[in-house]
Image (cartoon, rainbow, N blue to C red):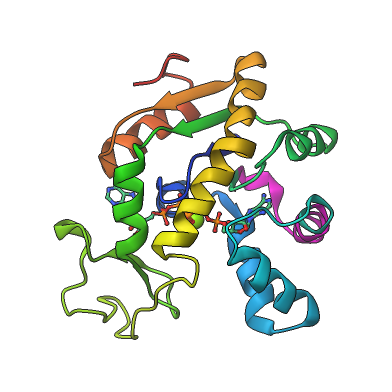
């Protein structure tokens, strides 16, 4: 199985595409953001400090990220193929990933304009129970009953950092720190660009990348 990285700004659909890949290919989805939010929910000392940091829209310190990632990898089944979602987010993290014994086959960039990202972030709702994602700003992604999960009936929640101000900071962090990572993988000749906004079209192209049937220029 292949190991891939999804690199994209906030709200571009990293988590959405990763969930679709898990469903279709049973790959291992590693979302650093989700791992950090799990820690926040435990309200440990570390969790409390992460909560404050993430609410600024800045990156969490590399040392903490490496610890969280290494401890997750220790017990994970890596043979299924990995989807890295939200890692690496700066050059030093990309170098750290290089030093692990994990071959990265493709880095996939989801290219989405800022205005669309903002609308997706501000409309995002998630089921805290079964983790299904919805979006109140897109007709085809709304739940059938407002704020209620179609699948399990739980009340949907909004992420703390999904406000206009924090989004602006997250986007700026992405431009300054994460965008250079694209060049890092372009130089390794494993970077693919996907410019589509259509969820299924993006997914079909990711599948083609995994199957080695999409040229590097992407769509
Ligand atoms: P993280 O949780 O990774 O957040 P993010 O990068 O800001 O990205 P999002 O999760 O908001 O967006 P997404 O691309 O997953 O989009 P989604 O699929 O949900 O990180 C949060 C914080 O943790 C960071 O700010 C940082 O502080 C810290 N952190 C994380 N990783 C770190 C690292 N490596 N180093 C240091 N710090 C780190 O989609 C968004 C919405 O749009 C959803 O409602 C979805 O339903 C909808 N949608 C998706 N695709 C489409 C589509 N094609 N059409 C219409 N709607 C769509
Ligand atoms: Mg996400």
Helix, strand or loop for the magenta stretch, by majority:
helix
Look at the image and give the residue range highlighted in magenta: 66-82
Residue at 19% across, 57% down = 138
The foreground one among 138 and 103 is: 138
Residue at 43% across, 65% down = 162
The foreground one among 102 and 139 is: 139
Residue 86: image x %, image y %?
A: 59, 48
Drawn side of residue 147 relative to residue 117, left or right: left
Residue at 83% across, 38% down = 100
Query: In this rendering, is residue 48 above or below 68?
Result: below
Quarter of the image with the N terminus is top right
The foreground one among 90 and 66 is: 90
Drawn side of residue 2 relative to residue 145, left or right: right
Query: In this rendering, is residue 6 above or below 145?
Result: above
Quarter of the image with the C terminus is top left
Residue 45: image x %, image y %?
A: 79, 81
Return the residue found at the far front: 165
Residue at 37% across, 68% down = 132
Q: Quadrant of residue 214?
A: top left
Query: In this rendering, is residue 74 above or below 204?
Result: below
* Residue 3 seen anywhere in this rendered image of the structure: no
Residue 18: image x %, image y %?
A: 47, 49
């Amino acid at each position: 199985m292949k190991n891939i990285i999804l690199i994209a700004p906030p709200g571009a659909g990293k988590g959405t595409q990763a969930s679709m890949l898990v469903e279709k290919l049973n790959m291992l989805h590693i979302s650093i953001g989700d791992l950090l939010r799990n820690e926040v929910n435990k309200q440990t000392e570390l969790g409390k400090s992460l909560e404050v940091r993430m609410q600024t829209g800045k990156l969490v310190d590399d040392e903490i990220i490496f610890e969280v990632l290494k401890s997750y990898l220790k017990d994970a089944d890596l043979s299924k193929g990995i989807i890295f979602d939200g890692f690496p987010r700066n050059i030093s993290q990309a170098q750290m990933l290089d030093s692990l014994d994990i071959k990265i086959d493709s880095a996939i960039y989801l290219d989405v304009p800022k205005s669309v990202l903002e609308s997706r972030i501000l409309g995002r709702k998630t089921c805290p129970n079964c983790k299904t994602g919805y979006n109140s700003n897109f007709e085809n992604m709304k739940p059938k009953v407002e704020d209620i999960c179609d699948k399990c009936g739980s009340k949907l929640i909004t992420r703390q950092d999904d406000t206009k101000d924090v989004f602006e900071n997250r986007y700026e962090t992405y431009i300054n720190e994460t965008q250079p990572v694209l060049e890092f993988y372009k130089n390794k000749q494993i970077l693919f660009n996907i410019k589509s906004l259509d969820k299924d079209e993006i997914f079909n192209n990711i599948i083609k990348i995994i199957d080695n049937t999409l040229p590097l220029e992407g769509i």
